[in-house]
Image (cartoon, helix red, strand yellow):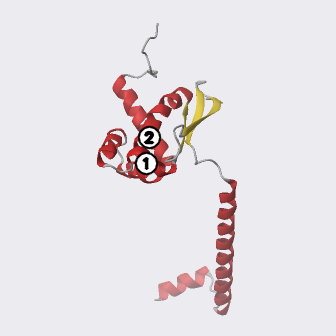
Amino acid sequence: MRHRVAHRKLGRVTSHRLAMLRNLATALFERERIRTTLMKAKELRPYAEKLITIAKRDEGQLAARRTVAKSIRDPKIVQKLFDTLGTRFATRPGGYTRILRLGPRKGDGAEMAILELLGSEYQPGKKEEKDKKKAEAKEAKEAKGKDEDAKSEDKPKRSRKKKDAAAEAE
């Protein structure tokens, strides 16, 4: 019987498993979307959601920051968790993550998944804005290039041999 047996061992000893969960949680909060195995994602979900709950509930109190800092060792990520993610999920009562199944991994057949924070989904409107900015930058570069071409036409062009000969003469 499996009474009071809560978590998966994931083929690791306790210290390694906890270190792995800390690293995965740090990567999740940093990138807001990670690709991992399905079992790791299922184990990481409650771990990460508890950290988000602490961050949103206690909004920057020192004790809460220290509690989160035990698991997330990077101070920049802790700050992001409290400032950005805590405020993003302030009105949400739970369920801050989503698991998307990808299918088996080619090498060993392990079931893969994407674990993402809600609100970090693909937004096609942003791509259009980036494309507009790229097009504007390209046009500005082309206009600048035309100006330089007009300036260079005024100067007579030398061949490489003449340049080398002139350099040796000097």
Which residue is painted at 65% across and 63% down in the image? 130
Number of disc labels: 2
What secondary structure is found at the residue carrying circle 1? Answer: helix
Task: Tell which residue pokes out farthest to the bottom in this image.
Answer: 154
Q: Is residue 97 left or right of residue 131?
A: left
Tell me the mark number nearer the camera, choosing from 1 and 2: 2
Q: Mark 1 or mark 2, which has the lower sequence index? A: 2
Amino acid type shown at disc 2: Thr
Whole-percent x and y of residue 144? 64, 81
* Nearer-the-camera pick, 119 or 33: 119
Q: Which residue is mark 1?
A: 81
* Nearer-the-camera pick, 52 or 58: 58
Which residue is painted at 43% across and 16% down in the image? 5
Q: Is residue 68 left or right of residue 112?
A: left
Q: Which residue is mark 2?
A: 53
Whole-percent x and y of residue 113? 59, 33
Whole-percent x and y of residue 159? 63, 82
115 w.r.t. 140: above or below: above
What secondary structure is found at the residue carrying circle 2? Answer: helix
* Nearer-the-camera pick, 152 or 170: 152
Q: Are marks 1 and 2 in contact (CB under 8 Å)?
A: no
In space, the residues marked 1 and 2 are separated at their CA atoms by 10 Å
